[in-house]
Image (tube, rainbow, N blue to C red):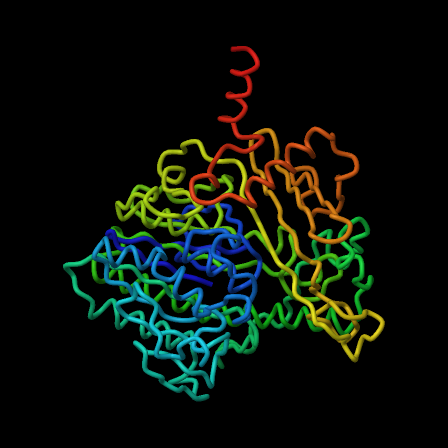
Amino acid sequence: FFFFFFYKRSLYFHTNDKCNISAYFAHFACVSQFVASPLCCPSRASILTGKYPHNHHVINNTLEGNCSSLAWQKSQEPQTFPALLKSFGGYQTFFAGKYLNQYGHSDAGGLEHVPPGWSYWVAMEKNSKYYNYTLSVNGKAQKHGADYSRDYLTDVLANRSLDFLQYKSSYQPFFMMVSTPAPHSPWTAAPQYQDRFNDTKAPRDPNFNVHGKDKHWLIRQAKTPMSNSSVQFLDDAFRKRWRTLLSVDDLVEKIVKKLEVRGELENTYIFFTSDNGYHTGQFSLPLDKRQLYEFDIRVPLLVRGPNIKPNQTSQMPVANVDLGPTILDIAGYNVNKTQMDGMSFLPIMVNSSSWRTDILVEYEGEGRNVSDPACPLLGPGVSECFPDCVCEDSYNNTYACVRTVAPSANLQYCEFDDNEVFVEVYNVTADPYQLNNIAKTIEQEVLEKMNHRLMMLQSCSGQTCRTPGVYDRRCILTIKHLDFG
């Protein structure tokens, strides 16, 4: 999860499946958000740069996939939205938590590397942990052990954040980004929360433990029904994830109270979001992300700040590439001066203005060159395999989607980069759990229009990513004008 505290003077942003993690979100607006890619590092890179993956070139969580690589540091980090806030807006900027999965790698500058744009830097080395981790504190390594009172990461991030709020200058605006690994694995809860939610199970939605008969082969290979051990494992993981979020709730409460005590809360925008969704048993896939479906790409969003009406819900399709442009807009920076693909969604939160109808989702699948010894029949090319030989990823699990939300259409159109050029299409209004792929029954004209829109978005950059979509009212008006003008 990410928390953005933005003092404009300031903004807070929250996303959660039900938009109700904490009582402290009671006065937030809820926005429907999608990720540009359902995997940690590409998605985080999209948040920081405001760009789709095909433009920031981070394709997976490895150094070879450009995750926190030297190439990323040279080409993208200087133009992230925090760097612009600091350079052009005079903001005090604070980062704490998980940055990019390979941050701190010895081949990419180690922990001494502090990305441009950060006044105060407290970043975790590599991927998610709760104990026995190392932080880069303004470029100096700080090791932590396994003592809860001193080392539990969520609490450490909360305390560091409170220190920043206490000692920052009151004469400059500030921006905070608090990036908690929770609820990422290994799902280690704080001691006081380890016995919570003992009777909780993962949601049994209509697509839970159901065979994806008309989907890409990777989904079809899942075994239905799932093994008892897989169901037990995913339920246990679901409980553990909820337990870790109780400490995130504590963090939210402490920081919001601190802002309130300092008289800064009402002049602060607050954002809270996640870098990807997660599935637990949908279409018989035990546990992971990386898929094109709503449960992996959708991360609802809460926002609080000046002139934002509380308790409102917007169905406009916001993407995480829009976060940077929105924050820059609040700071008074012209987004058109950047190369960002996203748009500021501030107008739709304050005055319900018109908005684009579609966004792009892209993912490049990963697989191993050799067969998994435990699953020899699957052959090479798959990865993330469970003990019962259900694999969550593969080389040709590479796809791009247009997600369209408009008054006249609520569609998802996806193409796979495989030998079949497999296509999946869903009417999400009629089929919210995406049980039926309508690619073979939908009108050919619609397929052609969505294919054309997808190709345009896959090659877009900057302002060309913001042009009207197939169901965009601006596009429809233009077509009518051409037809009858």
Specify whether residue 18 is in view. no
Residue 106 position in % (x across, y down) = 44, 81
- Which sits in the foreground, 74 or 165? 74
Residue 401 position in % (x across, y down) = 62, 46
- Which sits in the foreground, 461 or 143? 461
Q: Is residue 143 above or below residue 460?
A: below
Q: Is residue 129 above or below residue 336?
A: below
Q: Splitting the image into 4 quarters, where does residue 449 fall?
A: top right
Q: Splitting the image into 4 quarters, where does residue 156 fall?
A: bottom left
Q: Splitting the image into 4 quarters, where does residue 411 fall?
A: top right
Q: Is residue 376 left or right of residue 386?
A: right
Q: Residue at x 38, y 74 (%)?
A: 123
From this viewpoint, which residue is outermost toward the left? 171
Q: Is residue 25 left or right of residue 418?
A: left
Q: Residue at x 71, y 64 (%)?
A: 394
Residue 314 position in % (x across, y down) = 47, 40
- Which sits in the foreground, 255 or 387? 387
Q: Is residue 378 left or right of residue 112?
A: right
Q: Residue at x 72, y 45 (%)?
A: 424
